[in-house]
Image (cartoon, rainbow, N blue to C red):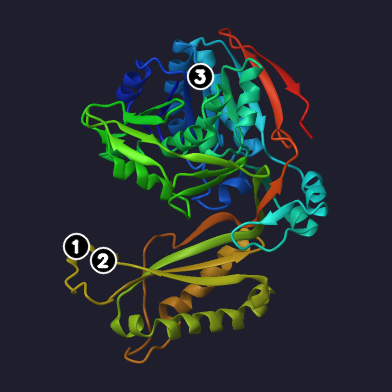
């Protein structure tokens, strides 16, 4: 039997400190936590930055690190720094070392780097061992070389490798969420169906409990016959419906989940509410081995983006919005070559339309059964931030006064939401690599480093050769 704590779905989101301390009293074997996601888009992988702020991340890390060392149990963090890139991993490492110095903690820290270079991927492509995911076209050597950064999503074996080499705390780059929690049970001989099912169910912490807003930590227990999940906080419960529904979270199938070593099948799983009314017992999942593969996630930089947000409430403009935005585009494209020396092919101009009560707020009296206002985002992506800014600024006279719409006396008008009106959003990336690469060895593309952290603040480092 193995008992684990899943404090939250993403490091930095936060969780109940009281719940964590209650969970820690359950004589648990390991604490795990996912720290990343692709839900926020490609920006964070492209820049190597985290979605959650440093203070948020440090707060969660400090609670977990102190608790793990107090109980002398492993702490496993996956997808460190949100994207799992080398820069993001180093950012998280520095926070951990800072906490260790200030709290006088000693432990062995393992870093698992998952950022991969183009040479390794090109060899895989040449060998026919890379396939597109979700309808992606075949990967080419050119698209690999053009990518800003590529990471490989690791399975449980790198965690197991680090723990076998004496790590007390493991900071991993990009990782399967479920692998964080499945790794220790698998290494202790728990049937893979049960281990992987537990990993999937507790990957997002309190998402399987209600009320979810309580921020309860989840305690998961897995053995040869099945698993149990329960929140460690009074007034919070897990239910069979809520637990079973998590198989659909970020997953196309309610029964099948593809992980690096194979496929979790929960078709015959049974979810049972136990007598305490807060714990759910689950059994019946199986795991089918498949050729080992890892997902490659890569981004390519497109340029820089600037935007302007304006509110439109004139019924004539709202009713003829396509003509209005089409004229703004035509006028900007016509003037850009002589004003900025660029043609329409040198930038992209897009309009996004949102809105409800944004213009008048609580003074709004119009009924809500029809569209009466639009929050219009005008955005430009160009080769430099300065050019993107100027192009958005150049569109504003047309946005404000330069387009006539039938039904208006003079010209269409818009209410600017902010001053300054143009906001610079920084670099823009697109997902350019979303493929699966077959591995001969589950550790193949990953690199390991070990730091012996002492209470005095020292951190002696040792690097292990990459498994390639």
Q: Earlier in the sequence, mark 3 or mark 1?
A: 3
> In the image, residue 453 lies at what x, y percent?
61, 13
Labelled pair 2, 3 in contact (Cβ < 8 Å): no
**Nearer-the-camera pick, 59 or 413:** 59
Separation of residues labelled 3 and 1 (CA atoms): 46 Å
Work out whether 40 lies above or below 13.
below
Residue at 21% from the left image edge and 72% from the top image edge: 368
What label sits on residue 99 in the rendered view? 3
Residue at 64% from the left image edge and 60% from the top image edge: 303
Is there any visible trace of residue 35 in the rendered image?
A: no
Alpha-carbon neighbours of circle 3 within 10 Å: few (<14), some, or many (≥20)? many
Residue marked by disc 1: 362
> In the image, residue 312 lies at what x, y percent?
34, 74
Left or right: where 363 falls relative to 296: left
Alpha-carbon neighbours of circle 2 within 10 Å: few (<14), some, or many (≥20)? some
What label sits on residue 357 in the rendered view? 2
Left or right: where 326 falls relative to 417: right
Q: Secondary structure at mark 3?
A: helix
Alpha-carbon neighbours of circle 1 within 10 Å: few (<14), some, or many (≥20)? few
Please state, as top left, top right, bottom left or bottom right, where the C terminus lies in the image: top right
Left or right: where 143 falls relative to 395: right
Labelled pair 2, 1 in contact (Cβ < 8 Å): yes
**Nearer-the-camera pick, 68 or 402:** 68
Separation of residues labelled 2 and 1 (CA atoms): 7 Å
Is there any visible trace of residue 266 in the rendered image?
A: yes
Please state, as top left, top right, bottom left or bottom right, where the N terminus lies in the image: top left
């Amino acid at each position: 039997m193995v008992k684990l704590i899943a404090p939250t779905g993403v490091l930095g989101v936060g969780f109940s400190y009281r719940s964590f301390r209650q969970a820690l009293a359950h004589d648990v074997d390991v604490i795990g936590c996912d720290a990343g996601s692709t839900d926020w888009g490609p920006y964070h992988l492209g820049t190597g930055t985290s979605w959650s702020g440093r203070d948020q991340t440090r707060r969660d890390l400090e609670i977990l690190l102190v608790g793990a060392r107090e109980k002398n149990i492993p702490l496993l963090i996956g997808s460190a720094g949100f994207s799992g890139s080398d820069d993001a991993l180093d950012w998280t490492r520095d926070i951990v070392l800072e906490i260790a110095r200030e709290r006088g903690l000693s432990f062995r820290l393992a870093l698992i780097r998952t950022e991969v270079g183009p040479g390794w991927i090109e060899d895989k492509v040449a060998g026919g061992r890379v396939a597109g995911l979700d309808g992606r076209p075949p990967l080419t050597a050119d698209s690999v070389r053009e990518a800003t950064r590529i990471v490989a999503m690791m399975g449980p074996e790198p965690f197991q490798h680090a723990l076998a080499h004496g790590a007390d705390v493991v900071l991993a780059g990009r990782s399967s969420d479920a692998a964080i929690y499945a790794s220790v049970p698998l290494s202790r001989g728990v049937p893979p169906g049960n281990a992987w099912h537990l990993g999937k169910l507790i990957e997002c912490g309190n998402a399987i409990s209600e009320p979810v807003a309580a921020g309860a930590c989840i305690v998961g227990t897995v053995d040869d016959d099945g698993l149990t999940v329960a929140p460690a906080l009074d007034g919070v419960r897990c239910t069979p419906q809520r637990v079973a529904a998590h198989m659909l979270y970020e997953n196309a199938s309610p029964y099948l989940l593809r992980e690096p070593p194979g496929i979790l099948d929960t078709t015959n799983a049974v979810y049972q509410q136990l007598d305490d009314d807060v714990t759910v017992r689950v059994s019946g999942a199986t795991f089918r081995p498949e050729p080992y593969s890892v997902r490659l996630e890569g981004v390519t930089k497109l340029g820089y983006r600037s935007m302007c947000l304006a509110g439109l409430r004139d019924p004539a403009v709202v009713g003829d919005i396509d003509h209005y935005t089409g004229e703004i585009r035509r006028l900007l494209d016509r003037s850009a070559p002589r004003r900025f020396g660029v043609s329409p092919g040198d930038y992209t101009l897009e309009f996004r339309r949102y809105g409800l009560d944004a213009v008048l707020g609580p003074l709004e009296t119009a009924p809500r059964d029809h569209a009466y206002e639009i929050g219009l985002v005008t955005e430009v992506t160009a080769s430099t931030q300065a050019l993107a800014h100027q192009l958005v600024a150049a569109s504003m006279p047309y946005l404000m006064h330069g387009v006539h719409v039938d039904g208006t006396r003079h010209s269409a008008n818009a209410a600017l939401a902010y001053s300054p009106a143009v906001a610079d959003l920084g670099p823009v990336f697109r997902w350019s690599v979303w493929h699966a690469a077959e591995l001969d060895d589950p550790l193949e593309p990953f690199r390991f480093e070990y730091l012996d952290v002492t209470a005095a603040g020292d951190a002696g480092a040792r690097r292990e050769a990459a498994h390639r």
